[in-house]
Image (cartoon, helix red, strand yellow):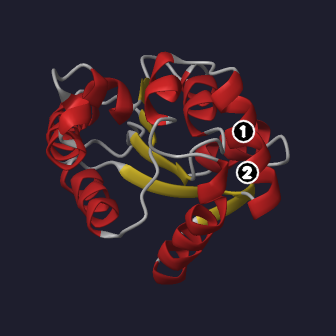
Amino acid sequence: MTRPHSVRRPLLVLLNGAPGSGKSTLAELVAAERPLALALDIDQIKHSLSGWDRDLHTSGLQARRLAVALIRQHLADGHDVMLGQYLARTPFLEELEQLAADCGARFVEIALILDEATLAQRLSARRERPDRPEQAANDRFVGPEDASELVASIEEVLFQRPGAHRFDARESVRARISALLSAD
């Protein structure tokens, strides 16, 4: 898709990080700063599929397929997409990057990093008082005892993705992310 030079390319922003790192919250906050931007949470799509929790793998793949179709259309319409998603392997990352290229969009990969102790604390607090319905549902499958594995999986992905922007999720990063996205 070719756009006139004066028209700003839409953005596909991936906010990757462990559960509890603030991905969904940041996606919503940053999307609110941009006209018609979509803050997309694939878990919400997954949880709207009947029986999703009886087959996590199949429901997760279907939710991703639906999300890709939604992202493609929104980018084609010239609008930004902020996607908060924990990705511990690279194939879907690469698919998103290619999707952005196919749509003439700018792909920005951001990783929200937490140390093991902070992540365990956040997961514990979230289990006690979930902020969103999908948190309560997902917390049946992940908890503070998984913090070490979650931190390691993000680091492993980032080793393969040197172009990803890393942000310490213990800090207030909204303004820094907004500045990064404004630079084109």
Q: Position of residue 95 (x, y in %)?
A: 23, 60
Q: Evaluate whether residue 90 shows in this view.
A: yes
Q: Position of residue 127 (x, y in %)?
A: 64, 30
Q: Evaluate whether residue 163 shows in this view.
A: no
| Number of numbered discs overlaid on the protein picture | 2
Q: Residue at x 20, y 49 (%)?
A: 57
Q: Position of residue 125 (x, y in %)?
A: 75, 32
Horizontal arrangement in the rendering, residue 109 relative to residue 36 (left or right): right
Q: Position of residue 106 (x, y in %)?
A: 40, 52
Q: Is residue 37 above or below residue 169?
A: above
Tell which of 62 and 93 is nearer to you: 62
Q: Badge 1 is on which residue?
A: 124
Find residue 148 and report its image quarter: bottom right
Mark 1–mark 2 distance (CA, rounded to whole Å): 6 Å
Disc 1 vs disc 2: Cβ atoms closer than 8 Å?
Answer: yes
- Disc 2, SS: helix
Badge 2, how many Cα within 10 Å: few under 14, some, many 20+?
many
Horizontal arrangement in the rendering, residue 97 relative to residue 30 (left or right): left
Q: Residue at x 27, y 35 (%)?
A: 75
Q: Residue at x 17, y 26 (%)?
A: 51
Amino acid residing under circle 2: Ala
- Disc 1, SS: helix
Horizontal arrangement in the rendering, residue 97 relative to residue 60 (left or right): right
Tell which of 161 and 170 is nearer to you: 170
Q: Which mark is residue 165?
A: none
Q: Is residue 88 above or below residue 160?
A: above
Q: Badge 2 is on which residue?
A: 120
Q: Is residue 65 above or below residue 163?
A: above
